[in-house]
Image (spheres, grey):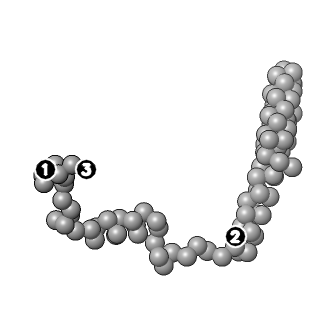
Amino acid sequence: MNVAAHLVESTLCACVAALLALVLRRGPAATRYAVWLAASLKFLVPFSLLGLAGTYGSSLVAPPDTTQGSVVVRWLGAAASWNVANFTSSALTGSPL
């Protein structure tokens, strides 16, 4: 089931639970509690299964190689090694670009 279908289904389930709770507002609290518990389980079960699948899947994927550092760190290291004194400006020398 894709994420959009799950969101639509969960939204409809919440709406139905809210309508049932509204209709049953004069009834026993245990009935309304059971309705909200069932709606909550509808939300919790798919996400718990997704979390379990993510935990299982993370053991199948190799961790990223962090020995070289990120691109930004490497770029900053290269920029720090530039020698600014060797750069000359065409405005200072009077020559056109």
Q: Nearer the viewer, residue 30 or 71?
A: 71
Disc 2 residue crowd, few under 14, some 14–19, many 20+, Cα 10 Å: few
Disc 1 from disc 3: Cα separation? 9 Å
Q: Which residue is mark 2?
A: 58
Which residue shows up at 80% across the image and 41% down it?
4
Disc 2 from disc 3: Cα separation? 55 Å
Residue 94 circle label: 1
Residue 97 circle label: 3
Q: Amino acid at mark 1?
A: Gly
Query: Taking 56 as reference, is 90 above or below it?
Result: above
Residue 7 image offset from top left, x and y in percent: 79, 40
Residue 16 circle label: none
**Looking at the image, is mark 2 or mark 3 nearer the viewer?**
3
Q: Amino acid at mark 2?
A: Ser
Residue 31 image offset from top left, x and y in percent: 87, 33
Asked if residue 39 shows in the view, the reply is no
Of labels 1 and 2, earlier in sequence is 2
Disc 3 residue crowd, few under 14, some 14–19, many 20+, Cα 10 Å: few
**Looking at the image, is mark 1 or mark 2 nearer the viewer?**
1
Of labels 2 and 3, earlier in sequence is 2
